[in-house]
Amino acid sequence: QVRLVESGGGLVQAGGSLRLSCAASGRFFSINAMGWYRQAPGKQRELVATITSGDSTAYADSVKGRFTISKDNAKNTVYLQMNSLKPEDTAVYYCHANIRKMGQIGTIDYWGQGTQVTVSS
């Protein structure tokens, strides 16, 4: 059973910074990609940033230059450093991982439980 456990959300003033972490645990063969999505009240869930096993990264236009995604392969952990936060960054942030499990063909998407990020103006 694969679990994604997030941490690091909270309340911060506009212009401030937060760092989110997400650790994958359980039995699996490999992680193809990990990333962060967010969902604000009344809006659809949207991609924030992703990083692949080959260290390729992608960001939503709204966070480019402010957020940085990174990972620690030894810890199966992905991080999201969020700087220059804006009130419009307020949302529940969800960790995502695309994982290949042992003895199975194909990959499976897993999601964390979500962590609240609130940016006050």
Image (cartoon, rainbow, N blue to C red):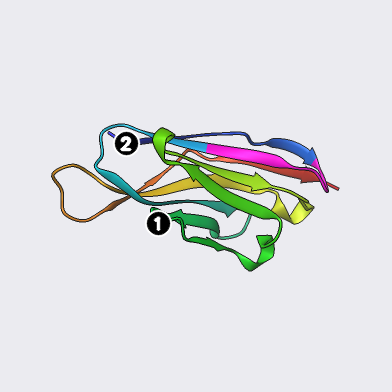
Q: Is residue 92 visible?
A: yes
Q: Secondary structure at mark 2?
A: loop
Residue, x 66% and y 62% (percent of image)? 64
- Outermost residue on the right side: it is 121
Q: Position of residue 14 (x, y in %)?
A: 83, 47
Residue at the spot of label 2: 2
Q: Quadrant of residue 74?
A: top left
Q: Secondary structure at mark 1?
A: loop
Q: Is residue 102 left or right of residue 110?
A: left
Q: Position of residue 113 (x, y in %)?
A: 48, 38
Residue, x 78% and y 39% (percent of image)? 12
Q: Position of residue 41 (x, y in %)?
A: 64, 52
C-alpha gap between disc 1 and disc 2: 21 Å
Which circle, 1 or 2, is nearer the viewer? 1
- Outermost residue on the bottom side: it is 61
Quarter placement of the N terminus: top left
Give the magenta part as a residue range: 13-21
Q: Is residue 19 above or below residue 107?
A: above
Residue at the spot of label 1: 54
Q: Is residue 57 left or right of residue 62?
A: left
